[in-house]
Image (cartoon, helix red, strand yellow):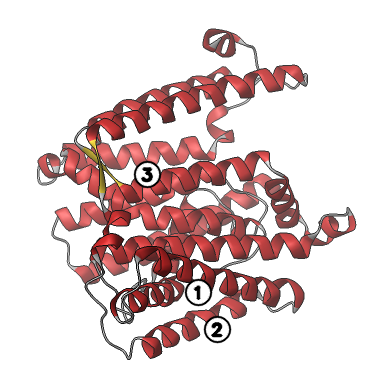
Amino acid sequence: MIQSILSTTAPPTSAFRQSRSLRTALVLLGLWMALALYPETREAFLAPGNLSNITAQVAEIVIIGVGMTFVVLTGGIDLSVGAGMAFFGVIAATLQIDHHQPAIVAIVAALAASLLMGLWHGLLVAHLKVPPFIATLSGFLAYRGLALLLSNARGLSPMNSDFAFLGGRIPGAAATAVCLLGFAIAVSILVYRHRRRRAFGLPAEAPSLVWGRAIAIAVVFLGALWVYRASMPVPVLIAAVVTAIGALLLQSSRLGRYAFAIGGNAEAARLSGIPVTRVKVAVYLMTSVLTAIAALIAASRTNGVTPGNMGLIRELHVITAVVIGGTSLSGGRATMVGTLLGALIFGTLSNGMNLLNLNSNWQLILTGMIILGASMLDSWSTRTEAR
């Protein structure tokens, strides 16, 4: 079946120019090759433990990035996710430390608060027509203040032992089983997409794109087996599941189709019968819940919460990853694989700068340059497509 997919003819188009995810993957591969060949980073970067740590560190960005992809796709933005992490983390930590509640109670309380916060943002943006920048900027300030108020501006630690599983690791045998399951699902989706296009009489995809996907699946599978042969961080597993669900929603659900339509032209979408208000509320609700999940993971990994620092400028990291991955800031274009690759690029750059012992001030400067470069690339791509 795979051979029949690869041998199918396709229109004479440039697969490289069409696939933003492929270009992003090549950038990531170039960064990895540079760090793997550079003498000062070669041994440390290629260690399975270091690669595992990179994926664990970007797991929070990936999880929030799934929701942010939908928000940006609809033409919005959410600047409150960093402060939201601190707020949700304080709720969970306060229940664990001050009120001696089990982990399940702390988790449910944080998720319940996230539902309220996401609903509030959705109502502000969709019903009251407050610009997303202003609606979420207010949260950027208010939620950090709430976190400091609830915690009395003190650090909360340590969490109870039953909370540690969110930041723990699964053993090598289970990690191998997860990798095999992921490989099987990816191959099944590749075959299913081909059969579905043929069933509906759609033009076949370019063979180079299919080859690229098949090779990428094999490389990711083998790489994951090597990196996680001893164990896999639980945050990585959660991020993988969230990304898979997000990709499914984006490409194969009514929510995803509506989000693309709204991002392209919200008024035209409304006139065509799309429930614009409900979709916008849903994407802000999703982002808030995913922010709470990331906050719980962060609290577990650090065994506590520092309300003044937790999630600090995390919203910029997430937006950078989303834009690097090919989601347009003007809305109407997004890819979940691109968001994952963008987060890995961001994490790789951060890890590389740490391995090179680069001054933290320069790291901030370079991060700002990355954000500017990603925005300029997005603007250039949009103008090119318009022409």
Residue type marked 1:
Ser
Of label 1 and label 3, which has the lower sequence position? 1
- Identify the secondary structure beneath mark 2: helix
Establish if 51 lies above or below 210.
below
- Eye-nearest disc, 1 or 3: 3
- Identify the secondary structure beneath mark 1: loop
State the quadrant of the N terminus: top right
Establish if 153 lies above or below 349.
below
The residue lying at 32 percent from left, 48 percent from top is 234
Asked if the residues shown at circle 1 and circle 2 are in contact, with their CB atoms under 8 angstroms apart, the answer is yes
Residue tagged 2: 138
Residue 28: image location, x then y, percent: 36, 41
Residue 237 numbered mark, or none: 3
Q: Quadrant of residue 195?
A: top right
Residue tagged 1: 80
Establish if 89 lies above or below 70.
below
